[in-house]
Image (cartoon, helix red, strand yellow):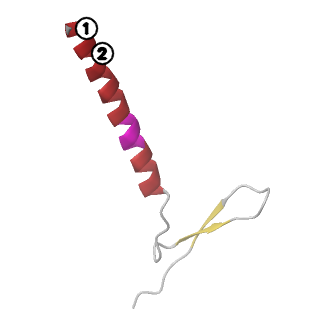
Amino acid sequence: MENKKKALEILLRKNIELYEKSRARKEKSKARSGTGNVIRRRKGDPDKWIAFELNRS
C-alpha cells in the first residue's frame, strides 16, 4: 500500500511539473504591444528580432 502511494505521489509531482513548464511556455509566447521589439517572419527563414526605440514623450 505504501509503495503504491509513493508511486502515485511521484507521478503527480511529475505531472504538475510538466503542467507548469507548458504554462510558462505559453505565457512567454504571447505577443505584447509596445515592448519595442518586432519579430520579422518569412516562410523558410529563421525569425528575426528587430529592436527599435519608441518615442514616449
The dot on residue 25 is none
Quarter holding residue 22: top left
Q: Furthest-right residue in view?
A: 44
Which residue is located at x 77 percent, y 57 percent? 45
Magenta residues (range): 17-21
Image quadrant in which the N terminus is located: top left
Which residue is located at x 46 percent, y 49 percent? 25
Where is residue 17 drawn, in percent x and y? 35, 35
Where is residue 37 drawn, in percent x and y? 54, 69
Mark 2 burial class by Cα count in 10 Å: few <14, some 14-19, many 20+? few
Q: Is residue 40 placed above or below 45 in the rendered structure?
A: below
SS for callout 2 = helix
Residue 4 part of the magenta segment: no
Is disc 1 in contact with disc 2, using a CB cutoff of under 8 Å?
yes
Amino acid found under the numbered disc labelled 1: Asn
Residue linked to disc 2 = 7
Residue linked to disc 1 = 3
